[in-house]
Image (cartoon, helix red, strand yellow):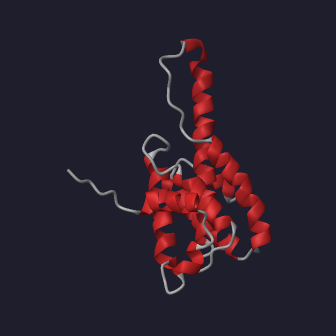
Amino acid sequence: VVTSLLSHDRREVCSSAMAALTGVLTGLSVEEISPMVNKYVVLANRSKMKRKKGEKNTESSAASEEKELKRAQNQQTSVFFLCASVMAQPYNTPPYVPVALSAISKHSFEKSAPLSVRDTVKRCCGEYKRTHMSDNWEEHKNAFSEEQMEALEDVVSTPHYYA
């Protein structure tokens, strides 16, 4: 029931559903959460925004609008679920967390996702880094592959512009 509310039109409903889901996931074991995370990683990878290639004919516009709506709902649901799974482990880094963070990081860029999804990804990655950058950051950091760490850094680090 809660996951169906992750793609609701109202932002407050989505946020509340994500908070509730975070609480539910906190009570589950890593073995129970991992398969769900894997399912939503696949969905997240499939639901990134695609570039539009020219104008399409008007006959398929209704079908393409419905397809785009479904893609957007899948994107929001998958990204919010993965964020909830990361937030459910505020001081640990189980094996599924680097996978989830890497998957959602792809949705933090303007061409990949709408603003609400990008903001949620940035907030989630920033919160993860804030809660885990403690005395044992090296231990958490070792749970990530180099590629996964770069994906996280791309979201949480501030870009530097030099002339």
Which residue is at a point 68% across and 47% down the rendered structure image? 43
Please give left or right for residue 40 compared with residue 91 in the image.
right
Q: Residue furthest bottom?
A: 135
- Locate residue 111, reporting x and y percent: 45, 40
Which residue is at a point 76% across and 74% down the rendered structure image? 29
Q: Is residue 55 visible?
A: yes
Q: Quadrant of residue 62?
A: top right
- Report how many numbered discs are placed on residues in the image: 0
Which residue is at a point 67% across and 56% down the rendered structure image? 3
- Locate residue 86, reporting x and y percent: 60, 67
Which residue is at a point 45% across and 47% down the rendered structure image? 109
**Image vertical order of residue 140 relative to residue 151, above or below:** below
**Image vertical order of residue 39 relative to residue 48, above or below:** below
- Locate residue 40, reporting x and y percent: 69, 53
Classify the position of the N terminus by image quarter. bottom right
**Image vertical order of residue 71 relative to residue 89, above or below:** above
**Image vertical order of residue 86 relative to residue 39, above or below:** below
Depth check, front residue: 135 or 55: 135
Please give left or right for residue 38 compared with residue 117 in the image.
right
Q: Quadrant of residue 5?
A: bottom right
- Locate residue 163, reporting x and y percent: 20, 50
Q: Is residue 17 visible?
A: no
Depth check, front residue: 133 or 143: 143
Depth check, front residue: 96 or 60: 96
